[in-house]
Structure formats: C-alpha cells, structure tokens
Image (tube, rainbow, N blue to C red):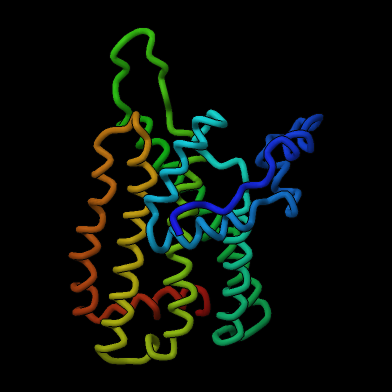
Amino acid sequence: RDEPPLKKDAMSQKGAYQGSGFPTYVRRLMKFRQMDLEYTFWQMYLMCTNPKVVYRHTMYRKQTKNQWARDDPAFVVLTAIMVFAVSILYCVFYSRSLGQAAYAVTRAVLVDFLGVGAGVATAYWYVANRYMREGVNHSHAVEQRVEWMYAFDVHVNAFFTLFVSLYCGQLVLSPILMMNGFLPRLLSGALYGVALSYYHYCVFCGYNVLPFLEHTALLVYPIALIMLVTPLAILVGFNPTKFVLGIYFH
C-alpha cells in the first residue's frame, strides 16, 4: 500500500526523551521497544517496490520535524539484524571453521554494512553539498544543505534492496551460481547487474526529492557503466558470486 501505518504517539515519545543529553537518534537506538517497527517494515517493502513513495514522506518529516533524516534508527537496526542472521546462514554452508565464521559475520555487519555504508554516505553527502546545491538567489533565502544522517538514510534504504537480492537471493541460488560454466556466470552477472543498478536508482530517488539540489540525474549514470561492464565481465569468465564468497570464505 502507498499510505504508511499509523505512527506512534510523538508526544509520549518526546516526554520519554526529555532530560537526556544524547541526541534523539542515539536514545532511540538504546530503546528497541520505542522504535516504530511497523512503519519501518512498510518502508522496507516500498524500497523494493516503489522507493519514490518512501521519499515523498521526507517532505512531511521536514515540515513537522525540520529535518530530512529519520530520527528513528529502526531501519538501521533491523537491517543489521537481518545481515547478521543471513551471514550466519552463509557460514553454515560455506565456512570451514568457527574463526572463519566469526570473521565473515563481523565483516558483513561492522565493515560492509556500517563501515562501508558510512563511507559511501559521506562521499554522496560531500558531492551533493559541494556540487549539486542550487545557488542562493537572494539574501533572505535560507541556505539548505544535505544532512549527513540523511545521506546515511539514503544509503541504508538502498542497501536494503541489495540485501534482498545479493544476500538472500544469492544464498538461495548459490548452489547454481557457484557451478562452473557459462550459465552460472550469466545468472550471477545478471543478478549483480540488476541489483547494483537498482541500488543507484534508489539513491537517485533519495536525492532527487530534495528541492535545493540540481543535476541529480547524474546519480543514475553509473547504471550505464554497469550495463556496459556486466556483459563484458561475463564474456571474460568472471563470476561475481564466486569472487565475493571467495573473499569471505577463502
């Protein structure tokens, strides 16, 4: 559906946060029961089906809370839990030792999801603020900038679609994708090509909704590069599934 589920009572939550010196986001990170899980699952579903609807609601958040970024860490927390769980399943099938399993799970959650995610978000945040902001045309205009937390939200939203395809989907198809031959390479290349292209489309949707940015169409240009490189990689014998799993379970 295109309408979000009912949100929790904001005033009761506000009262629970008063008297603390931590930012709201961190305080809610420590209180799992106060996270809006229903709304988060709704967002996760729409990120895979119609991401533009998710970002239409950022305008409402800006009007009511004067910020573009979410103040609820539920999306990040749930995604991290899912990455952790699916990584354990990968270890059940492909890990050769307990130490290797611990390395794979830790790397998937702390490095690939959170660490790389923070780096990617920082890169987009810098490029958007440095090169994509519209000029302020008059002295009374309020200068607007992309919040770092919003850039991180955009990446996490898009990453969830990668999780569905390249974590869950790849795990289910891995017995086929890990085989030798042209067909497994073709299926693996197509899976990665479509997943990475959709990731960049979701990133574009996140930045395109901000009214003070221009030239956001540049964010979909990597899709053309992916469409060019993917068939070439398949023809030269590159199997991305074997390559990625080889990094974790060498």
- Name the residue: 36% across, 35% down: 128
Left or right of 189 on screen, residue 96: right
Q: Position of residue 9 (x, y in %)?
A: 69, 42
Q: Position of residue 50 (x, y in %)?
A: 38, 58
Q: Could you tell me which quadrant the N terminus lies in?
A: bottom left
Furthest residue toward right:
19
State the count of labels.
0
Please report the residue visible at 50 percent of the width from the left and 45 percent of the height from the top: 152
Which residue lies at the image location 50% right of the left edge and 56% below the top edge? 43
**Residue 229 vs residue 36, the one in the foreground:** 36
How far across and down, in percent of the image, does residue 187 sit? 30, 82
Q: Residue 32 is drawn in which quadrant?
A: bottom right
- Dividing the picture into quadrants, the one containing residue 183 is bottom left
Q: Is residue 40 above or below residue 108?
A: above
**Location of residue 165 in the rendering, given as x and y in whole percent from the top left corner:** 42, 71
Residue 169 vs residue 229, the one in the foreground:
169
Tell me what residue is drawn at x 43 percent, y 90 percent.
175
Query: Dividing the picture into quarters, in which one does residue 86 lie?
Result: bottom right
Name the side, left or right, on which 137 lies relative to 250: left
Q: Nearer the viewer, residue 237 or 28?
A: 28
* Residue 174 versus residue 128 in the image, above or below: below
Work out whether 232 lies above or below 31: below
